[in-house]
Image: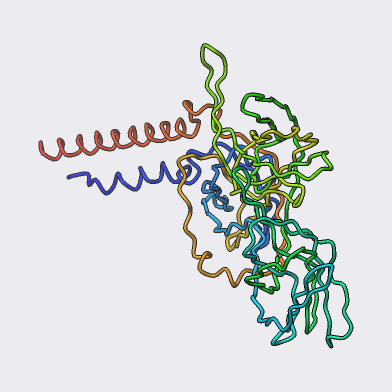
Amino acid sequence: MKLKPLFILPMLLLAQCCVAQTKGYQYKRALSQNTESWNKIELPVVIYGQITPDLRDLRIIGTTADDKTVEAPYILSGNAGKSAASLLQFEIINKSSTDRGYYYSFRAKKQSTINTIKLTFLEQNFDWKIKLEGSTDLQNWFTVIEDYRIVSLDNEKVDFTFTNIIFPESEYKYYRIFIPASKQPSLITAGFQYSNQMKKKLTEYPAFSLTKEVDEKAKLSVYFVTLPHTIPLAAVKIEAANKIDYYRIVNIEYLVDSINSEKGWIYNYRTITSSMLTSVDSSAIKVPETFTRNLKITIEENDNVPLDILNVKAYSYRHELFTRITTPARYSLYYGNENATKPIYDLENFENKIPENMPFLTLGNEQKLITDKNDNSISIINKWWLWTVLGVVMLLLLVFSLKMLREGKS
């Protein structure tokens, strides 16, 4: 009588099934009582220091009443504030001037709500404070926005343009732009838009520490920023105390790694983005989403008086998981696995069916599953299971071998 290999295989699989889905994960957080439908999970900021930068290692895994392991699918939402801009049709109907400047009048082919006008000029160097007015009959004009600054600089050291007019939603048949210029501007295009910017769930993080170094020879001011936590950085706001006009090139880098050498610590930074720090536009500088806690900000001062930077603020989008639970179980969120691959769920093909309102699941305290990467407790459990199964198999082989010998003698 032969012992078929197929008999051994199910036993080996059984030894692995209890830990296969969670093998390699370093952390987990228990989820609160769930409903057997759609649920929402918001990732806390303290979690970003343990997960992979592309969030591929997130898993929602549960244990049923009969100790079976189940996995709940999810869709990740970064709440990055998607925008939809619709271009509206306007035609220029009049150009006129006074001793104060020049007027450009436009008529809508169809009266619609707008909140943005994108201007393009042939000129490359100007600094104007314009006025935008609206009218329904070309007789009575109402101020939409005034003293709005548009700028274009193009020289050896600066290449900067800010010519988008952004204003509260307005709905007029006619619009008029006044430009206080000494000679007629060469207006090339004027794009009228309604930008439907979805509300962004942004979280602000003031700098935990801010230190400054000055390179007088290179005419640079370098700021080192430490944030309270590792965050998925989405924007950086640099606040200067200076009341004068300024235009400075700024380079934003993040810390990649550090090496302890004989000469001390060597810190390696990588550029996230380069932009223009200017008094004209004080909004935050958007950056590609980057997981980091440490920033290096370099400002090119040139021959100017260095800027007095009061504060640096970082912003990140809140990530949420939308999960659909169909099997009753005790679920936990697992994370911290560098070897994990991005999960593929059917839910990705049915995002349009995700309900707008769903209950939140809260996360419990973090539980560390692996104390050391070289001492995997899950691997130890696997080894004990494997030795147990091998022992059982050897015992069965011995029993069947003795039985076969007895049958041969008889």
99 with respect to 407 (left or right): right
72 with respect to 178 (left or right): left
Residue closest to the far top: 262
Give the colour scheme of this rendering. rainbow
Q: Residue 105: x, y in percent? A: 75, 79
193 with respect to 99 (left or right): left
Q: Nearer the viewer, residue 95 or 399?
A: 95
In the picture, the quarter occupied by the C terminus is top left
Residue at 28%, 47% in the rendered image? 7
Picture layout, residue 157 above or below residue 329: above
Q: Nearer the viewer, residue 343 or 237?
A: 237
Q: Nearer the viewer, residue 323 or 219?
A: 219
Residue at 79%, 76% in the rendered image? 176
Residue closest to the far left: 409
Q: Residue 225: x, y in percent? A: 69, 32
- How many numbered marks, from 0 up? 0
Q: Residue 200: x, y in percent? A: 72, 58
Picture layout, residue 181 above or below residue 223: below
Residue at 57%, 18% in the rendered image? 265
In the picture, the quarter occupied by the N terminus is top left
Instruction: Write down the quadrant of residue 258 in the picture.
Output: top right
Picture layout, residue 179 above or below residue 64: below
Instruction: Write down the quadrant of residue 248 in the picture.
Output: top right
Residue at 57%, 44% in the rendered image? 334
Q: Residue 360: x, y in percent? A: 72, 57
